[in-house]
Amino acid sequence: MMNEKKVRIAVPTHPGKDVKPSLVNITIKEAGLTREESLKPLRES
């Protein structure tokens, strides 16, 4: 079983503005995830 730890990361968003890809990449890295791991929940839904 994978060692799971819960991490909470705040992503600032503003109405009418997109989150830049660089911020998404930084957030994924801070969470300790790979790109594939971060996309897995989207693919499962």
Image: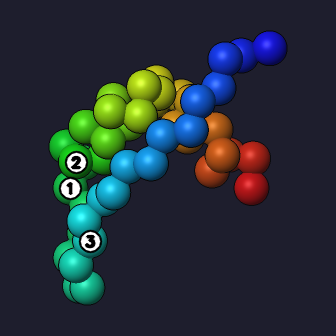
Are the two marked residues, 1 and 2, in contact with CB atoms closer than 8 angstroms? yes
Left or right position of 33 against 10 = right
Q: CA distance from mark 1 to mark 3?
A: 10 Å
Q: Which mark is residue 12?
A: none
Image location of residue 21, percent across then percent down: 25, 48
Query: Residue pushed farthest bottom?
Result: 15
In the image, what residue type sits under mark 2? Leu
In the image, which is nearer the foreground, mark 1 or mark 2? 2
Q: Residue at x 37, y 49 (%)?
A: 9
| Mark 2, residue position | 23
SS state under label 1 = loop
Q: Residue at x 22, y 48 (%)?
A: 23
Q: Is 20 located above or below residue 24 in the figure? A: below
Bin the neighbour count of mark 2 within 10 Å (Cα to Cα): few under 14, some 14-19, many 20 and up: few
Q: Quadrant of the N terminus?
A: top right
Image location of residue 32, percent across then percent down: 42, 25
SS state under label 2 = helix
In the image, what residue type sits under mark 1? Lys
Image location of residue 2, percent across then percent down: 71, 16
| Mark 3, residue position | 13
Q: Residue at x 47, y 27 (%)?
A: 33
User: Which residue is nearer to you in this view: 27 or 19?
Assistant: 27
Q: CA distance from mark 1 to mark 2?
A: 5 Å
Q: Residue at x 41, y 34 (%)?
A: 31
Q: Earlier in the sequence, mark 3 or mark 2?
A: 3
In the image, what residue type sits under mark 3? Thr
Q: Earlier in the sequence, mark 1 or mark 3?
A: 3
Bin the neighbour count of mark 1 within 10 Å (Cα to Cα): few under 14, some 14-19, many 20 and up: few
| Mark 1, residue position | 20
SS state under label 3 = loop
